[in-house]
Image: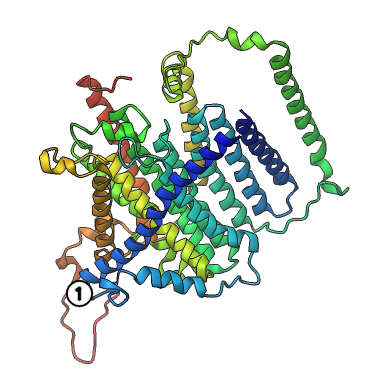
Amino acid sequence: MQEYFYLLLSEIYKILFLLVPVLVSVAMIVWLDRRMWAFVQKRRGPNVVGPFGLFQSLADALKYLFKEIIIPASSNKIIFILAPIVTMTLALIAWAVIPFSEDFVLADINVGILYIFAVSSLGVYGIIMGGWASNSKYPFLGAIRSAAQMVSYEVSIGIIIINVLLCVGSLNLSDIVLAQEKIWFIVPLFPMFVIFFISALAETNRPPFDLPEAEAELVAGYQTEYSGMMYAMFWLGEYANILLMCSLGSILFLGGWLSPINIYPFDLIPSPIWLILKILLLFILFSLVKAIVPRYRYDQLMRLGWKIFLPFSLFWVVLTASYLLYFNLLPVI
Amino acid sequence: MIVHAIFFYTFSLIAILSAIMVTVSRNTVHSVFFLILDFISVSCLFIMIGAEFLGMIMLIVYVGAVAVLFLFVVMMLNVVEQKNTLFESDSNGKHIPIGLLISLIIFFEVIIVIGGWKYKPDLLNSISLNISSELTNTHSLGYILYTDYIHLFQLSGIILLVAMIGAIVLTFRRRSGLKRQSYFKQISREKVEGVDLVSADSKKGVKIDV
């Protein structure tokens, strides 16, 4: 019995060692996002609390913590309370399989990429539950839009992942990174990287695809009725999902923890640093897109997903498969 | 081993309870949420017996796509507080004999499966497929599906394709009198076509709507 106890303790220690940095970096990334946004628009952004305004997110979190949680009288209370919990839990459990270096990974499972895909496809439930349980027009419209949008873009992300898997021959995330030792997949699969980036924007409800919470038409979409800590949990879950998509992009296309230049002074830098730098690079791209691109119309969004991305990535699957087959490059198991 | 048992019984208990709640629950949306919980716990059971690929595919396909559509339909139909009329004797009781028949058939099927497993334990060994234990189950599934059963696999793909096309054809309708936007037309419009200079006579004006 005692060995189980120690096993449990060490696992909890490992989980905390992963989750606390993730949560802190989510808070920091919100600050970075707002600063980038302000930078593009020639504003200053949050710069009052702490040095460079670094503690702005902590101040915000404190404010949310002390605000009253208002539950609408006509809402479905259990589901209303469950929705932000589901969103945040799902955003955090996906981090279990992200490899930060060759041996620094919480759960090195065989079907890691499928696990991430499954968890991100469950993410839509938090939004539907929140929108439906609020029992109000705008949240419901936002939830329906969001569900349709996330289901559509999941399809194209799935097919992009198939492209990468054809080159790797394994569903394990560490294997995917190790397969890129010679060349990062962004070089041979560059069009797929672009489509993955845009689909990830749509999957995480980021501008220009933030139609579920389009403030011009739907107040705040599915979050309209939420307040206090529950709103903050939606928020945290959203940004944790964005970070997750960034890390998935860097693992699939940018070589994960591998260093770009393998010569003397650079190979001293530990591999998790490289992964974090790549995630940051992708995130800065995400926030630049938010600052410079206007919002899409809903029918344009659906057309882009189903009529352009899906056929193109399917075509690319055929192309990749035939190329690998013709030049006898298929991965050997 | 005891931890394994604890997890197994937890997941199967959740699966059975939520399966019961799907039929008992009065609120239809709650039923769908219990169905989702059922799917999730069954896929956990799949993962526990080592079929991680099946478990994940179950999560992705059933929970991530099919149940979302269920939820959509149920929310749209507005059958939130539906009366549970199963045990009331009114004119709507016609479905009960058919339901009983179907559940009887399922009951006998389960008995056959359990009987085969109980009294013929060597049945499993007579399967002719040789599954290597070194491969991950994704690889071994791929080896079997794309070699021995390639024709059946392709056939099921074709059936799904036909069903998909059928569903699209059934729901597709083109209404007349709608103004549709053509992106190609909008982008390829020239300045010359858009602006029309007309010289207007004084106190007469010009008719612009052609």
Tell me: residue A322, above or below residue A21. Answer: above
Q: Identify which residue, A292 or B131, lies in the foreground.
A: B131
Give x and y (percent) for residue B36.
60, 45
Q: Residue at x 37, y 32 (%)?
A: A172
For label 1, the crowd category at 10 Å Cα-Cα, with few meaning under 14, some 14 to 19 and many 20 or more, is: few
- Quick check: B108 left or right of A45? right
- Quick check: A147 left or right of A169? right
Q: Residue at x 43, y 44 (%)?
A: A14
Q: Is residue A312 visible?
A: no
> Tag 1: residue type?
Lys
Q: Quadrant of the N terminus of chain A?
A: top right
Q: Is residue A49 visible?
A: yes
Q: Residue furthest left?
A: A264
Circle 1 marks a residue in which chain? A
Q: Residue at x 26, y 60 (%)?
A: A289
Q: Quadrant of the C terminus of chain A?
A: top left
Q: Residue at x 30, y 41 (%)?
A: A251
Give x and y (percent) for residue A192.
26, 41
**What number of labels is visible?**
1
Query: Is the image coloured rainbow, by chain, by secondary structure, or in one colour?
Result: rainbow
Picture quadrant where residue A286 is located: bottom left
Q: Identify which residue, A207 or A186, lies in the foreground.
A: A186
Tell me: residue A23, above or below residue A71. Answer: above
Give x and y (percent) for residue A280.
26, 54
Picture quadrant where residue A113 is located: top left
Give x and y (percent) for residue B2.
63, 31
Tell me: residue A140, above or below residue A310. Answer: below
Tell me: residue A112, above or below residue B153. Answer: below
Q: Residue furthest front?
A: A2
Picture quadrant where residue A38 is located: bottom left
Mark 1, residue position: A42
Q: Identify which residue, B63 or A275, lies in the foreground.
A: A275
